[in-house]
Amino acid sequence: MQNRIAVAMSGGVDSSTAAWLLQQEGHDLVGVMLKMFDGALVNGSREDDRPPDGVEDARAVAGKLGIAFYVLDARAPFRSHVLDTFTSAYERGLTPNPCVVCNRYVKFGFLLQQALESGRDQVATGHYARLELDRGSGRWLLKKAAHPEKDQSYVLAGLNQEQLSRSLFPLGALSKEEVRSIAAQADLINAKKGDSQDICFIPDGDYGSFIRQYTGKSYPSGPFLDEGGAVLGAHTGIIDYTLGQRRGLGVSSTRGRLYVKEVRPQDNSVVLSCNDSLYGSTLTAADLNLIACDHLSAPVRLRAKVRYRMAEQPCTVEQTGPDTIHLAFDQPQRAITPGQAVVLYDGDTVVGGATITP
């Protein structure tokens, strides 16, 4: 059956190959690039009308496929849902995952809404994940990619049933090598193009510099403390630090290497400790989004990960409120970080995701 699909195209090999595969299946496609952020869109209302990075590659691929291609201005929703919440979280001593938020509210929120209003049925992306309809429950299940080294189900765990029912992930069963091979055989211009940065709006990884530029604020220095409250030195502003961090502290200790254990906006301090003190076995989380079920009626054995690049670990999860959970790992985990997403798995199936609370 031919579907009318909007393909989110970034100019990279993944989304381009996804578009090519869908065209081979006979679908009616349109390519859409989201203009979400550029170097000038910081600190106030200054606009920059330059095209987004990768637009020429995406346009070239769309031209080769013979499909229409549009650049959709998504700067307003990206600012409100991603940039504003990202900077606010750091100011509160949290470490958010902006990709999770962007997928939920921009790529599968704003873009999906625009696609449906323009007569499209679905949105497709180059994410490495799989979808499956559970005929018994009628629920759409989000599953890990067939090749775990490229699995991106973690950053999709905020999607709801309506979003999943309208989504397509053509690359879910493929490896990166297979995707590049398909792109090369199809003579796509970006077959050998490198992978993009995880956080598109901070390509140099300097979060503190970006936050200062975006907000126009200065963040005062304060004390580095040890676990007993003794002052070890001075930090450069709490937005420069996240749990588990070792580099850039500028503090030495006779007790060995020091790491960030806690960021305290209430008194503008940063607590440092040895590595062993970073481990914990429990967490609480809010903003729960369950995908595989409506509710966890009793404590359940699952596996969970608290960062994108880690293997999920065995745990017990109890739902404690309409959108809150308590989770206990079998083994202590390093630097469980408030603001990050915790994603729950039952085998290859994503049970749901939530945001770790302090």
Image: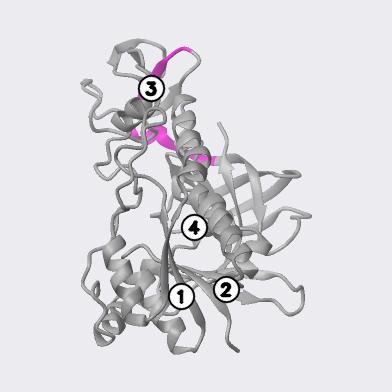
- Describe the element under mark 2 as helix, strand or loop: strand
Front-most of 264 and 40?
40
Residue 201 lies in what quarter of the image? top left
Numbered range of the magenta stretch? 267-281
Q: CA distance from mark 4 to mark 3?
A: 27 Å
Is the residue 299 above or below the residue 22 in the image? above
* Label whose residue precedes the other's in the sequence (3 or 1): 1
- Describe the element under mark 3 as helix, strand or loop: helix
* Label whose residue precedes the other's in the sequence (4 or 3): 4
Q: Amino acid at mark 3?
A: Ile
Q: Which residue is mark 3?
A: 238
Residue 197, given in percent of the width and then of the height, sits at: 30, 53
* Label whose residue precedes the other's in the sequence (1 or 4): 4
Q: Are marks 4 and 3 in contact (CB under 8 Å)?
A: no
Residue 126 lies in what quarter of the image? bottom left
Q: Which residue is mark 1?
A: 172
Residue 233 visible, this orientation: yes
Front-most of 330 and 59?
59
Q: Which residue is mark 2?
A: 131
Is the residue 195 above or below the residue 327 in the image? below
Residue 21, given in percent of the width and then of the height, sits at: 42, 83
Q: Which residue is mark 4?
A: 154
Residue 203, given in percent of the width and then of the height, sits at: 27, 45
